[in-house]
Image (spheres, grey):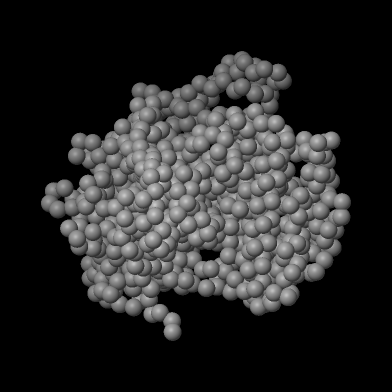
Amino acid sequence: MKAFRRFTVRVPLPTELTHLTVLAHNLRWVWHAPTQDLFATIDPALWDATGDPLRLLADVEPERFAALAADPAFRERLTAVRNDLESYLAGSRWFGDTTDELGSAHLAATGIAYFSMEFGISEVLPIYSGGLGILAGDHLKAASDLGLPLTGVGLFYRSGYFHQSLSHDGWQVERYPVNDPTSLPLELLTDAGETVIVTISMPGGRQLSARIWVATVGRIPLLLLDSDLPDNDEELRGITDRLYGGDQDHRIKQEILLGIGGVRAVREYVRVTGRAEPAVFHMNEGHAGFLGVERIREMVGRPGTEALDFDTAEAVVRASNVFTTHTPVPAGIDRFPRDMVRYYLDADDAGMSRLLPGLPVATVLDLGDEADPGVFNMAHMGFRLGQRSNGVSRLHGAVSREMFADLWPGFDADEVPIGSVTNGVHGPTWTARTWLDLAVDDEAGQAAAIAAMSPENIWQVRSELRTRLVEEVRRRAHDSARGRGFTEAELGWTAELFDTDALTIGFARRAATYKRLTLMLRDPERMRRILTDPQRPVQLVIAGKAHPADDGGKALIQQVVRFTEDPELRTHIVFLPDYDISMARDIYAGCDVWLNNPVRPMEACGTSGMKSAMNGGLNLSILDGWWDEMADGENGWAIPSAEGVADDHRRDDLEAEALYTLLEETVIPLFYNRSASGVPERWVQMVRHTLTRLGPQVQAGRMVRDYTAALYVPAADQLASICADDFAPARDLAEYRHQLERSWPAVQIAGIDESGAGDSLDADGPQRVNLTFTAHVALGELSPQRVCVQALVGRVDGNGEIIDPEVVEMSPTSETDPSGRTLFRATVVPTRSGRHGYTARVLPRHPQLSDDAELGLVRYPVGTAEDVGPGSGSGSLPEPA
């Protein structure tokens, strides 16, 4: 009979071994090899089968523990590993060592709360689905290694994401195993022995309750909210049942719990533990957008005279919120029906929200405005409530500026205040032990050691890693086929699957349409010839999941599986189901080439190729995401993109042809061109370059350092600044925005006078032109110090558009024109020859704005189409509450 629910019983360990429990519950073991080796010693077979310390401690017989307790050598190792963990947790790290250099005193005294819908820490904690979760997990690990005072916030899913298997005909089948929190590396947050509960008001007078599980990731606490409580009705209890499961109604409840419940969980954790209140709140995608309005609610709802009005509270919250967008396509944004959001905001008779007491429902709804009046856009709310925002690669930053330009009308896309921090991956998690052992915990030392290795030694390591992958592929392919119903008599070929000496290519990612899982099969016969060449064979390992509701993605997987089943091909190409962290580590380590062929520019970052590069894999990819900025011709190959071709089928044909040609004429010959000693010397040269030059660039440590310097420290400093003198700067900014609402319609540039000396702008050769511009600016009730007036000068195209303008700030004078307009003046010296043009513009300016374009308001000279703001029909500021 099947158990209704499972639980774990653990017999107490001998006193001498109690440190094992501590080591098992701190997830630093995920990337700390000595801790892994210690657990492997207890039961090597069980460790190989599970890789799970808690499972090991639960399943090993008491007699084995008794023997280990009596073993001085094991006790000595245990003490050494436990002492190493204590030193890691208490010792000085990068952030503490560079506090003065970074100017990060405000951040050091407080910290960061990092919110994400999923976290991929380890396969033993299955609360992740793919890239976003793995990125979030690597962010926490790197933050721990660097000593950042960061707290993670997410949801605990009773079933997590699905396990994938294949039916006999190759169709994806999903299975949702139950996560038992008592068997996972989690501790329940309690206060004086009582479970800490956060509550959220739901429509109809209901109340959502959630408990808080805490996972310890090195130095970082990860708070996971769980709604599976008897106090909740069946609907509310199921909110945290599955990651990305259910319909939009289910999804919005998850995001309300993450954003609103997550802030409340942070407050409870701080209260119970005494940890400092975080100053900076980081929204990792729009899923966490509700955290911004919850923080506003806290300030508006404070008792007595300490309460702030909405606009002042919003100014404080925006100053310290960071928003990261991960999608380069509108379809990837969470967009809910406006009426659904209104329902959950649950207005009372006065129009105030019961979900967020003290906040007007209409004002909250305006934060998610977009072009479609019936839709609430979570990304738009993230941008509006996050003063600092970024994409996840340089190219994705540019795409995001174009994609969200409507939020900053009147500005060229390159002026939209969305930056970029290119993702990275956690080296100790994803790099094979063979490379790591060259210099433990030292990226520079590892690179130096590899630089000193002989070509023969580098090739030997790569060959060993490929051999291990081949063994793993054979095992997994056999198990998958058995699960599909094939008999042992039919599976003898799996023992011969793959060749330990053949060029091995990896392709593993979500089966989303834009990632083009089947581009490699565009010409099946040509692919067949490439794979089965008797002199230069190629083998291809493929993995990835389709979303349970994505039948199109499942059909792509089935197409690949059927191709692999051809008896002539099946030893050269394989699809491995149930792609997860455990499988990924083997594939990244063993593949010689990492293939990525998305539709440019739809891959925001695509970190899988980074993990391969850390192991000496060479990338073969469309120039998209991170590869667009880091490909240098020595670390792999760029597949030419037919980006300008409108016909998708024609584009796929062209790019598949480019892929086949690169493989046949460049990649494969280079791999098989061997020296007298059997080493492909040019190939090894590229591997060495990849490991020593590209490897450090793609580290998550570099990413988190970039976030710290560019976003976290400025946000913490901004919060301290805006809250000074009992929130006087915040109140001033709120009043300034009200003033803009009243005055911006009266702001205009009535004209620009020019005078100059020197050569003509049309002359050839170096320019010696001094141009003085005087702008006649009507300011309404605004003072000259509360605006920024700029002159923009540059060469023009045939349509009169200024190309790459030089922007010079114009200074206010004490003069006015006969109509009382203020005169602003600047002198410009053009630096290039050619046909030039100029214009001027007015922007809001306030010391608490991080960018003059932040509010999306701009005035150009009267009569130009770019004029934007209230009074010109396209204002972007919300109405004040």
Residue sitting at 82 percent across and 66 percent down?
Answer: 568
Quarter assignment of residue 85? top left
In which quadrant of the rendered image does the N terminus lie? bottom left
Residue 701 visible somewhere in the drawing: yes
Residue 790 percent location from the top left of the image: 47, 31
Determine whether 763 is above or below 49 in the image: above
Residue 491 percent location from the top left of the image: 72, 71
Residue 70 percent location from the top left of the image: 36, 50
Residue sitting at 46 percent across and 40 percent down?
Answer: 704
Residue sitting at 75 percent across and 67 percent down?
Answer: 493
Depth check, front residue: 25 or 92: 25
Determine whether 512 is above or below 718 in the image: below
Horizontal side, residue 692 vs residue 131: left or right: right
In which quadrant of the rendered image does the C terminus lie? bottom left
Quarter assignment of residue 446? top right
Depth check, front residue: 202 or 189: 189
Residue 831 percent location from the top left of the image: 61, 22
Residue 368 visible somewhere in the drawing: no
Horizontal side, residue 107 vs residue 461: left or right: left
Depth check, front residue: 487 or 750: 487
- Give the tally of numbered discs: 0
Depth check, front residue: 510 or 776: 510
Residue sitting at 63 percent across and 53 percent down?
Answer: 587
